[in-house]
Image: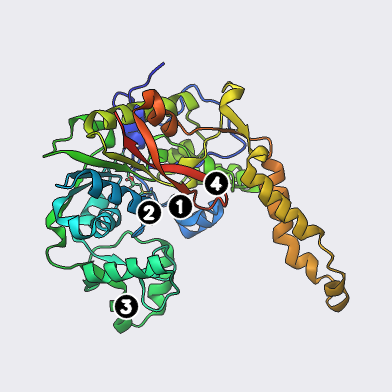
C-alpha cells in the first residue's frame, strides 16, 4: 500500500508536531495518527513540570535549530554546490525554522554566496514570522555557543565564528519572542539589562537580499514555484516530524519514564491540548507508512533537482534510528546489541565497572559505588535492556534515495547523541 503524504490527513495535521512513542506501547495501530489539527505546544501542557516529567525538555520544541548545525555536512553540500553550479542555483531549505540554517548556508557559500538564492520554507507560520523578524541569540546553553567570544573553539569553529561576526551584527532586543529554548532564559535572567544586549544579533545590510522565508510544506515540493535551476533541497531534522517518529530518542527514554508517562496520562489528558498530545505520545506509525512518506518526498525531490544537485538530511537520532516492526523481514534488521558502536560502548562500560578500585575504596569507603552509579545505570538501563530491540539497517530515507541509483551519498555525519553511530546526510543526484 502506498500512502500519499498529500492525501494523508494525518500528515497534514501532524506537520510541525513531534511524537514521543513510549516503550510500553510499541504495537502497530490500525489508525496510527490523530486526525485533528494540533498546534504545538498546546496551552497548559507545555509547562516546566511537564517537560521535567518527560525528561526531554527542549527536544519537545519542534522548531529547534542552531547556526551551523552539523556544519561538516553543510560544508560538504555548499562545496558541492559551488563546484556543480558555478553560475549559482536556487536552494530550497524546507523545515527552515527561524532561518539559522538558511543564514548558515549563505555564510558557507563564501565568495559565491551572491550567486545563490535561498528560500527557507516551513509549515509553521509563527516560526516564519520569527525568521522574517531576523533577530537571533547565541548563548552558553546552545549548540552554537562556539560563536560567542571567549569560548573554546577548534580551528574550523574559529573560522565559522569569524564568518558569523562578519555577516551578523548586534541587535536591539526584539519585542517579539525568539525561537529559544528554556535554557536561554536561564542565561538571560542572570544578566543585567545592559549586558543582555550582547545576546542579540541580526544580519548586516545586504545579507537578506538573497534569502527569503515563507510558509509551505515539503509535501507540495512538486508544485513549488521557483526561478532557475534547483541545486539543493534541504529537509533536516524534520522528516521525523513528518513521519511522527522518535525512535532514536526512545532508546534513551528508560522504562521508568514510560511508566511515569502512563501514570500521568489522565492528568495530561485533562489539560488543554493534552488529549491530542497523548495521542501523539502513544501512537506509532508503521515502517511501511514511514517508507511511503520518504518515497514520496524523495521522488518529488528527484523530479525537481538538477543532476549534480544535493538533497540534505539531518543527523538527529530521531531521523537516523528507526525501530523495525514485528513483521519487518530479518534481512532488513539489526539487533541493537549487535551494532558495533553499541558493543564497543558496552565493553567500555563493563571495563570501567570491573576495574580494581580497592585503593580508592580503602581511602574513601563507598565512594566508588556513588561514582560508578551512572555507569551502571547506562549499562543496565540503556544497553542491556535494549539489546534485543530490532533496528532498521537502512532508514526509510536512505532506501528511498538509493532506489534505482538516482542519488549517491556524498557525506556521512555522526549521529547526534549516539556516539559511534553514523548516517549519510548529503546525497547527490547522479542520473
Ligand atoms: C527540528 S526543526 C529543524 C530546523 C532546521 N532544519 C535544523 O535542522 O536546525 C524542524 C522544522 O521543520 C518544520 N517542518 C516539519 N514538517 C514540515 C514539512 N512537512 N514541511 C516543511 N516544514 C516542516 C517544523 O515546523 C520545524 O520548524
Picture coordinates of residue 117 (x, y %)?
16, 49
Does 312 sit above or below residue 99?
A: above
Observer-nearest of 150 and 308:
308
In the rendered view, would you say 8 is above or below 203?
above
Q: Quadrant of residue 10?
A: top left
SS under mark 1: helix
Q: Earlier in the sequence, mark 1 or mark 3?
A: 1
Q: Residue at x 45, y 74 (%)?
A: 152
Residue 400, horizontal then vertical, whole percent: 40, 28
How crowded pointer 1 is (Cα within 10 Å; few <14, some 14-19, many 20+) is rated as few
Task: Kindly identify which residue carries mark 2.
Answer: 64
Position of 416 compared to 425: left or right? Answer: right
* Disc 2 residue crowd, few under 14, some 14–19, many 20+, Cα 10 Å: some
Q: Nearer the viewer, mark 2 or mark 4?
A: 4
Tag of residue 59: 1
**Image location (x, y in percent) of residue 333:** 59, 29
| Residue 125 shows in this picture | no
The CA distance from mark 2 to mark 3 is 22 Å
Say above or below: 52 vs 201: above
Q: Are marks 2 and 1 in contact (CB under 8 Å)?
A: yes
Please give the label number shown on residue 421. 4
Instruction: Quickly name the residue at label 3.
Output: 196
Toward the viewer: 359 or 34? 359
Disc 3 from disc 4: Cα separation: 38 Å
Q: Residue at x 17, y 50 (%)?
A: 116
Amino acid at each position: 500500500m502506498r500512502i500519499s503524504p498529500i492525501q494523508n490527513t494525518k500528515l497534514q495535521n501532524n506537520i510541525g508536531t513531534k511524537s514521543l512513542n513510549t516503550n510500553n506501547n510499541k504495537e502497530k495501530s490500525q489508525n496510527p495518527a490523530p486526525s485533528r489539527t494540533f498546534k504545538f505546544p498546546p496551552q497548559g501542557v507545555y509547562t516546566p513540570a511537564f517537560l521535567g516529567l518527560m525528561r526531554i525538555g527542549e527536544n519537545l520544541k519542534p522548531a529547534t535549530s542552531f547556526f551551523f548545525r552539523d556544519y561538516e555536512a553543510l560544508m560538504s553540500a555548499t562545496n558541492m554546490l559551488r563546484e556543480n553550479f558555478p553560475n549559482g542555483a536556487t536552494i530550497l531549505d524546507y523545515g527552515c525554522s527561524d532561518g539559522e540554517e538558511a543564514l548558515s548556508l549563505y555564510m558557507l557559500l563564501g565568495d559565491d554566496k551572491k550567486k545563490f538564492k535561498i528560500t527557507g520554507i516551513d509549515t509553521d507560520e509563527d516560526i516564519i514570522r520569527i525568521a522574517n523578524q531576523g533577530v537571533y541569540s547565541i548563548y552558553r546553553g546552545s549548540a552554537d555557543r562556539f560563536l560567542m567570544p571567549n569560548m573554546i573553539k577548534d580551528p574550523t569553529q574559529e573560522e565559522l565564528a569569524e564568518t558569523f561576526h562578519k555577516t551578523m551584527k548586534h541587535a536591539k532586543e526584539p519585542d517579539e519572542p525568539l525561537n529559544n529554548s528554556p535554557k536561554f532564559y536561564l542565561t538571560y535572567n542572570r544578566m543585567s539589562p545592559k549586558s543582555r544586549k550582547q545576546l542579540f544579533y541580526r544580519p548586516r545590510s545586504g545579507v537578506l537580499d538573497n534569502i527569503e522565508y515563507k510558509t509551505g510544506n515539503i509535501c507540495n515540493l512538486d508544485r513549488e514555484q521557483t526561478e532557475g535551476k534547483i541545486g539543493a533541497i534541504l529537509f533536516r531534522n524534520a522528516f521525523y516530524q513528518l513521519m511522527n517518529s522518535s525512535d532514536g530518542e526512545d532508546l534513551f527514554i528508560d522504562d521508568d519514564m514510560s511508566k511515569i508517562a502512563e501514570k500521568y496520562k489522565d492528568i495530561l489528558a485533562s489539560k488543554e491540548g493534552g488529549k491530542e498530545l497523548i495521542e501523539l505520545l502513544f501512537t506509532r506509525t508503521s515502517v511501511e507508512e514511514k517508507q511511503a512518506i520518504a518515497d514520496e518526498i524523495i521522488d518529488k525531490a528527484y523530479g525537481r533537482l538538477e543532476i549534480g544537485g544535493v538533497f540534505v538530511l539531518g543527523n538527529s537520532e530521531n531521523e537516523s534510528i528507526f525501530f523495525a516492526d514485528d513483521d519487518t523481514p530479518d534481512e532488513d534488521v539489526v539487533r541493537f546489541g549487535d551494532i558495533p558502536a553499541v558493543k564497543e560502548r558496552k565493553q567500555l562500560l563493563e571495563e570501567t565497572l570491573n576495574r580494581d578500585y580497592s585503593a580508592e575504596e580503602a581511602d574513601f569507603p563507598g565512594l566508588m559505588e556513588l561514582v560508578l552509579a551512572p555507569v551502571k545505570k547506562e549499562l543496565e538501563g540503556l544497553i542491556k535492556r535494549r539489546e534485543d530491540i530490532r533496528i532498521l539497517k537502512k532508514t526509510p530515507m536512505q532506501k528511498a534515495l538509493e532506489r534505482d541509483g538516482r542519488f549517491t551519498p556524498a557525506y556521512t555525519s555522526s549521529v547526534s547523541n549516539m556516539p559511534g553511530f553514523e548516517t549519510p546526510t548529503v546525497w547527490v543526484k547522479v542520473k
